């Protein structure tokens, strides 16, 4: 490998050569891809893992939920660590932790062990995802960031496809443990390349660590997300109510503490920026609506149509592929015309895709699922790079990490909440154990239960459309879009004075 440029720390994005920008994006793309592979490949392996580890259905659900919970709890904190100790350093640490966690997951001998090692994987994933967006902002000039986020978005799409294909091959012909072991050589290679390519280009912010804020925010999120998760297994109970109340109290205490703290974990003044605030909450509601759709469709294909997890996932591949193709193009539109138009268009298209899913019946042709996935994937491709660009464009450079961590936190809350909503809606139509079983792909539904599930799915998907509509309203609230100035020109203030 050729030696790469090593610009001084604190160099601005405009000083980074295009060749260096391309190398940085390649490393970040690899990191996003490995994280995305793990989301789909693990879902495919759940039936085999359940049998081999002699685990129960609830434990298998926690193999997914533990990872998402840790991502959600840590995103803001580790984004702040990136601002304080170096975004590249934290990103590289993420590769190390994720790789070690993957190795231990592959060696697990019981369900509880695997859940614990997934928690470790989640710590590494939080370090990777919460600092990658800030590294883009450090290395890529504003006029090209939309395209850069579109390229990074390819990693999510391609990673999801690779997870499906690799998972099918490894589970069928090798062993489920290799769905984790495969991350180890990839992580080592990515770490070596990143060491040569990535350099911190922003000054470290010398601040005290807000340990009290970390505990209050992490504890509040944990209790609320734990309650949502437990509701999928046991329904609403007195314990669930205590968890929700405790979480709300801790989050209220967090806000009060941050207002009084001299070095807050989350600078609440960020919410004075209207575009940034609208964008991060648009991401929350988009995730709440869209991830429930994916879970419901997988349950429909596995429980109602009798497909295996691998075959069900293959039908969603076209949507991922169209997202990979359209993402960079949508990012260029955001660079030229601002983020509001493409982000809002993406949400509107996604709502149409969900509406198509909501017309599925017990005997609908499977090609219709493919068509709906293409429409849904097109909407995703427009929303994500545009919305990410809006967040970074309106965040102070000193807080790129915190702003990106905040975006990831709200998105992950949406993912976890969406997962819980999907299982709750399904279990309101069919027995809870049957809902868990069809999600895991270890059982099919009788004709009577299949008909009941489809009716419940329609209600869930219509609720998802309403959540996406809220995200669309928030996206439109951005007002006139802020367009990044061409390189070499002085930046213009945001039209609403919030830039």
Image: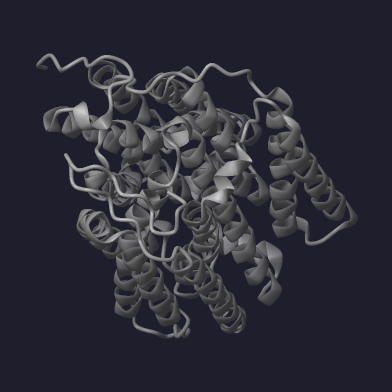
| Whether residue 386 is situated above or below residue 191 in the rendered picture | below
| Whether residue 31 is situated above or below residue 329 in the rendered picture | above
Residue that lies at the very extreme toward the left in this rendered image: 2
Q: Which is nearer the eye, 331 or 368?
A: 331
Query: Where in the figure is residue 100, as x and y percent of width and height?
Result: 46, 21
Q: Which quadrant of the structure image shows residue 359?
A: bottom left
| Whether residue 332 is situated above or below residue 105 in the rendered picture | below
- The residue that appears at 41% across and 49% down in the rendered structure is 40
Q: Which is nearer the eye, 240 or 389?
A: 389
Q: Which is nearer the eye, 375 or 167?
A: 375
Can residue 69 be seen here? no
- The residue that appears at 31% across and 73% down in the rendered structure is 375
Total labels drawn: 0
Task: Give the quarter of the figure containing the N terminus.
Answer: top left
Query: Where in the figure is residue 224, as x and y percent of width and height?
Result: 73, 49
Can residue 290 be seen here? yes
- The residue that appears at 48% across and 51% down in the rendered structure is 276
Q: Is residue 149 left or right of residue 434?
A: left
Q: Is residue 89 left or right of residue 79?
A: left
The colour scheme applied to this rendered structure is: one colour
Q: Which quadrant of the structure image shows residue 439?
A: bottom right
Query: Where in the figure is residue 193, as x and y percent of width and height?
Result: 24, 21
Query: Where in the figure is residue 328, as x and y percent of width and height?
Result: 22, 53
């Amino acid at each position: 490998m050729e030696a790469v440029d090593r610009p001084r720390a604190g160099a601005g994005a405009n000083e980074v050569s295009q060749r260096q920008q391309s190398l940085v994006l390649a490393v970040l793309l690899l990191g996003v891809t490995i994280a995305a592979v793990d989301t789909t490949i693990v879902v495919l392996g759940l039936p085999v893992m359940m049998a081999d580890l002699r685990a129960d259905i609830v434990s298998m659900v926690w193999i997914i939920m533990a990872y998402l919970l840790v991502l959600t709890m840590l995103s803001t904190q580790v984004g702040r660590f990136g601002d304080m100790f170096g975004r590249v350093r934290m990103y590289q640490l993420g590769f190390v932790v994720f790789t070690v966690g993957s190795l231990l997951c592959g060696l697990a001998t019981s369900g509880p062990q695997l859940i614990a090692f997934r928690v470790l994987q989640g710590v590494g994933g939080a370090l990777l995802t919460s600092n990658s967006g800030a590294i883009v902002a450090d290395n890529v000039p504003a006029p090209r960031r939309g395209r850069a986020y579109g390229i990074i978005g390819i990693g999510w799409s391609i990673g999801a496809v690779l997870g499906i294909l690799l998972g099918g091959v490894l589970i069928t012909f090798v062993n489920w443990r290799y769905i984790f072991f495969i991350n180890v050589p990839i992580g080592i290679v990515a770490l070596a390349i990143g060491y040569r390519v990535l350099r911190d280009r922003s000054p470290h912010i010398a601040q005290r660590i807000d340990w009290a804020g970390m505990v209050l925010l992490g504890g509040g999120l944990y209790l609320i997300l734990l309650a949502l998760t437990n509701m999928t297994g046991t329904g609403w109970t007195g314990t669930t109510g205590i968890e929700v109340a405790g979480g709300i109290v801790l989050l209220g205490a967090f806000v009060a503490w941050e207002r009084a703290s001299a070095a807050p974990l989350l600078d609440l003044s960020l919410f004075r920026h209207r575009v940034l605030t609208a964008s991060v909450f648009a991401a929350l509601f988009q995730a709440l609506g869209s991830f429930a759709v994916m879970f419901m469709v997988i349950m429909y294909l596995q429980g109602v149509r009798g497909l295996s997890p691998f075959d069900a996932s293959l039908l969603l591949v076209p949507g991922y592929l169209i997202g990979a193709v359209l993402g960079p193009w949508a990012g260029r539109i955001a660079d030229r015309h601002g983020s509001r138009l493409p982000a809002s268009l993406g949400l509107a298209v996604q709502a149409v895709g969900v509406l198509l899913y909501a017309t599925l019946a017990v005997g609908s042709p499977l090609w219709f699922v493919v068509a709906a996935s293409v429409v849904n994937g097109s909407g995703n491709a427009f929303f994500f790079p545009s919305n990410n660009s809006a967040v970074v464009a309106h965040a102070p450079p000193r807080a790129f990490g915190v702003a990106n961590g905040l975006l990831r936190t709200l998105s992950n809350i949406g993912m976890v909440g969406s997962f819980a909503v999907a299982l709750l809606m399904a279990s309101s139509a069919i027995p809870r154990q049957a809902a868990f079983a069809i999600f895991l792909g270890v059982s099919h539904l009788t004709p009577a239960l299949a008909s009941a599930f489809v009716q419940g799915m329609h209600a869930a998907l219509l609720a998802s459309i309403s959540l996406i509509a809220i995200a669309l309203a928030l996206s439109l609230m951005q007002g006139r879009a802020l367009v990044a100035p061409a390189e070499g020109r002085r930046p213009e203030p945001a039209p609403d004075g919030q830039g």
